[in-house]
Image (cartoon, helix red, strand yellow):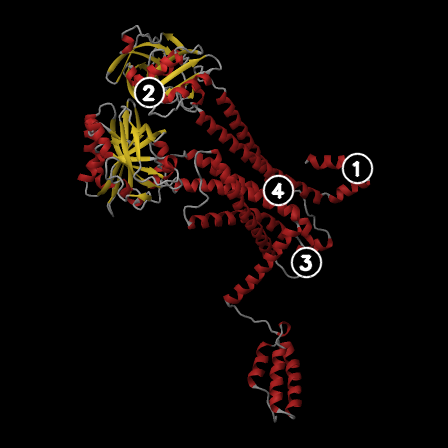
């Protein structure tokens, strides 16, 4: 041939063109080329190249046979994109069913998120401390009577001894909690709890200092405030170098200067404080009264050196136990353990007097189970509704199978569509939890759940598991069910869709079992609340008021104030108060050692509190022995010892032998869900009185409270007014019960709504299955009520 087309263009045409079209396309291109080349070779070459490019169309491109993973992935992604679009179209096309599914899943996911945030925040408490992996709380196994308990308290000198004598210990800090101190700034007086801590407190813990000195506990008259307390006392003004006066239980008033304001991180820390003062001052004030092995530190923490573990000094602990047991024979330490600070909150429910707030493991298990049940309910609801909606897509399924879709492709399509719906539900659940559920939970309980996860990895794992879990559980059965249809039968209308399915009914039955179980528990919770509200306290608490005081002077002043009041039946003083303040002590009686709750009281206290006498008598001011060696016990103590004739028997505590002069019926002094333990009541001198108790005529307690409140500034100008009625003693318990009932009621309603959604799905399912039957029945005269009855029977 005289002329040849460009080689590269010719080879490109041969490479991409389908074999069955190559001869025809290439022949036409050659014919055009030769015709034009006789006139102009350059124009012919350009025209040939243009024709090769012009024929480069999808229908002319041959299929590439390759096993390349890249090509397979690209094809798979194209398929997924198609299924994703199909999922979005079906959501909008079948809006009713989609709304039911999204609403049910969103409710369940929102509840699960709220519950998981509670659990996650609890188990991640105290993780912010820089030395957290080396920081340990020391605990004591204490034998008191026949019982052994785990105490947060440890021997006062244990911390300094470990730091001095054990090479593996880097530093230590002790905390003493001083309760009910009156703190004043100008005219503002509040009753507060103060922590006395060692100067190493901020070296051990990582609470951020917001303002003030970086070494705020160096001066023994300095005081550190939390951010909340700084706002409470000083508002938006700078608190640094301001002076606060603290009135101690001895009546002594000491001025402290604010050295720092600290963020106590309520969302991240399990220990929350308001005020810190140096342990140096507390030791100086108490002198030798606490600096010995017989005294206790409320909490002791140690920081180990890098690479060291508390096991390095484990063998040395016995000698410290021996020193404590020799100095304090009342409470014997049998063992000392170390708890990592990361586990402190989760173990606090087993530790007596822990400064960390606790959440019982049963609560964690209960709320976690509820979250799982709600998710399962929502998934089963989705299954029922999804199966019911299949009748609307039968032709689509048939056509897909006819044009080549196999069973696995149909399954994949439905799983992808389900994943799209679950993703939308997850986003809706997050919004629901953020806007409503978490704030509602925080309003019911005295804790704050932050809407944040402990770490990014935790968040990703949680959302990933929830999303994949509900997508697989809710989508597996509908996709398998749909893929099993015969394409020919569908298109011929012979597919028996909606035949009775035991599995579908079982799912719905399981939904209702869980729903009604939840409702029953909710009703039990409400019944439990009503039971406690009507429960007999063991005494008549109505028209009784109490007022915290400090000593004899304030007691006499209040006595003079109320003596002329006709509405006052009687009043009394006490060093402790039933339901507010008491003390555990070791008691020996009838060769039995045990712990009992001790109430040091004044004369007429039992009569004022309407305590019921079972046998014997109460205290008599005229009897000399009643002031020193007489005691009244409750029924639980008599049962514990096994007395049949308790009056006249003897018990010993604090090294003194007391004669039992009376037995009182059991009365509640702790929350109603706790057992009634042994209690003892004995007389204390007026100088130790911490409470003034008043019994008044019916309906006049508010009047008495107002009289004392108006006169309080004259009676106790340096102390805050804290008077209350006796019915408020268990207010926190009642409020907690009410909150639990509200939560259970809300959860039961969600469970019932989800079950009803599932029932709607089953009704739609049955309606699709029996459409022809109902049509024939209508033709033969059946009315709407008959059809409704037939639908309701199943």
Q: Earlier in the sequence, mark 4 or mark 1?
A: 4
User: Residue 131, located in which quarter of the rendered image?
Assistant: top left
Q: Which residue lies most toward the left here? A: 165
| Tag shown at residue 504 | 4
Q: Position of residue 364 (x, y in %)?
A: 44, 36
| Tag shown at residue 399 | 3
What is the quadrant of the N terminus in the image?
bottom right
User: Residue 783, located in which quarter of the rendered image?
Assistant: top right
Q: CA distance from mark 4 to mark 1?
A: 28 Å
Q: Earlier in the sequence, mark 3 or mark 2?
A: 3
Q: Earlier in the sequence, mark 4 or mark 3?
A: 3
| Tag shown at residue 782 | 1
Asked if the residue at tag 3 contacts the one at tag 4, i.e. Cβ–Cβ closer than 8 Å, the answer is no
Compared to residue 16, the image places residue 231 above or below, namely above
Q: Nearer the viewer, residue 95 or 271?
A: 271
Q: Earlier in the sequence, mark 1 or mark 2?
A: 2
């Amino acid at each position: 041939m005289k002329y040849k087309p460009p080689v590269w263009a010719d080879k490109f045409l041969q490479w991409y063109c389908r074999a069955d079209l190559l001869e025809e396309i290439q022949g036409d291109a050659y014919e055009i080329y030769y015709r034009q080349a006789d006139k102009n070779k350059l124009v012919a070459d350009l025209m040939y190249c243009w024709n090769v490019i012009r024929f480069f169309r999808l229908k002319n491109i041959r299929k590439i046979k390759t096993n390349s993973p890249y090509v397979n992935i690209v094809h798979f992604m194209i398929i997924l994109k198609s299924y994703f679009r199909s999922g979005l179209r079906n959501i909008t096309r079948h809006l009713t069913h989609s709304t039911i599914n999204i609403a049910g899943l969103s409710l369940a996911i929102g509840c699960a998120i709220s519950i998981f945030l509670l659990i996650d925040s609890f188990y991640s408490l105290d993780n912010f401390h820089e030395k957290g992996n080396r920081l340990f709380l020391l605990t004591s196994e204490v034998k008191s009577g026949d019982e052994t308990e785990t105490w947060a308290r440890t021997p006062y000198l244990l911390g300094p001894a470990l730091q001095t004598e054990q090479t593996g210990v880097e530093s230590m800090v002790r905390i003493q909690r001083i309760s009910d101190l009156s703190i004043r700034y100008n005219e503002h007086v509040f009753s507060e709890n103060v922590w006395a801590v060692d100067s190493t407190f901020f070296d051990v813990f990582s609470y951020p200092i917001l303002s003030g000195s970086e070494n705020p506990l160096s001066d023994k008259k300095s005081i550190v405030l939390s951010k909340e307390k700084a706002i409470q006392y000083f508002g938006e003004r700078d608190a640094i170098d301001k002076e606060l006066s603290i009135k101690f239980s001895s009546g002594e008033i000491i001025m402290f200067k604010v050295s720092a304001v600290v963020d106590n991180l309520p969302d991240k820390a399990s220990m929350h404080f308001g005020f810190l003062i140096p342990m140096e001052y507390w030791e100086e004030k108490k002198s030798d009264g606490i600096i010995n092995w017989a005294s206790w530190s409320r909490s002791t923490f140690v920081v180990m050196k890098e690479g060291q573990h508390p096991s390095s000094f484990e063998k040395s602990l016995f000698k410290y136990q021996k020193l404590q047991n020799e100095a304090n024979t009342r409470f014997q330490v049998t063992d000392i353990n170390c708890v990592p600070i990361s586990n402190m909150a989760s173990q606090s429910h087993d530790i007596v007097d822990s400064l960390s707030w606790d959440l019982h493991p049963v609560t964690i298990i209960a709320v976690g189970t509820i979250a799982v049940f709600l998710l399962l309910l929502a998934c089963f609801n989705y299954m029922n509704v999804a199966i019911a909606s299949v009748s609307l897509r039968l032709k689509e399924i048939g056509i897909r199978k006819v044009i080549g879709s196999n069973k696995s492709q149909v399954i994949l399509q439905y799983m992808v569509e389900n994943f799209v719906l679950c993703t939308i539900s997850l986003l809706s659940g997050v919004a629901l939890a953020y806007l409503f559920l978490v704030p509602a939970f925080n309003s019911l309980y005295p804790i704050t759940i932050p809407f944040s996860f402990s770490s990014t990895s935790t968040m990703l794992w949680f959302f990933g598991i929830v999303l994949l879990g509900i997508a697989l559980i809710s989508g597996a059965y509908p996709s398998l069910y749909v893929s099993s249809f015969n394409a020919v039968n569908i298109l011929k209308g012979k597919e028996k869709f909606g035949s009775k399915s035991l599995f579908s009914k079982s799912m719905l039955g399981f939904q209702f079992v869980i729903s009604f179980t939840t409702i029953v528990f909710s009703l039990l919770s409400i019944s439990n609340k009503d039971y406690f509200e009507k429960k007999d306290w063991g005494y008549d608490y109505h028209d009784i008021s109490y007022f915290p005081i400090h000593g004899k002077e304030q007691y006499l002043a209040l006595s003079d104030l109320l003596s002329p009041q006709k509405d006052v039946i009687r009043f009394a003083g006490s060093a402790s108060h039933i339901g507010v303040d008491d003390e555990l002590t070791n008691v020996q009686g009838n060769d039995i050692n045990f712990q009992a709750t001790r109430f040091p009281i004044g004369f007429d206290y039992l009569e004022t509190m309407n305590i019921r006498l079972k046998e014997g008598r109460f205290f008599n001011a005229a009897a000399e022995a009643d002031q020193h060696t007489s005691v009244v016990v409750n029924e639980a103590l008599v049962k514990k010892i096994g007395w049949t004739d308790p009056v006249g028997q003897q018990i010993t505590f604090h090294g003194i032998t007391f004669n039992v002069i009376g037995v009182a019926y059991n009365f509640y002094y702790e929350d109603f869900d706790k057992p009634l333990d042994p209690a003892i009541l004995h007389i204390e001198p007026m100088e130790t009185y911490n409470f003034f108790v008043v019994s008044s005529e019916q309906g006049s307690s508010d009047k008495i409270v107002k009289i004392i409140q108006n006169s309080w500034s004259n009676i106790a100008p340096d102390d805050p007014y804290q008077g209350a009625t006796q019915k408020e003693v268990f207010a926190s318990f009642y409020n907690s019960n009410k909150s639990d009932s509200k939560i259970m009621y809300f959860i039961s309603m969600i469970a019932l709504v989800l079950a009803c959604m599932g029932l709607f799905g089953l009704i739609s399912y049955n309606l699709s299955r029996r459409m022809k039957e109902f049509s024939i029945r209508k033709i033969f005269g059946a009315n709407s009520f008959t059809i409704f009855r037939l639908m309701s029977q199943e």
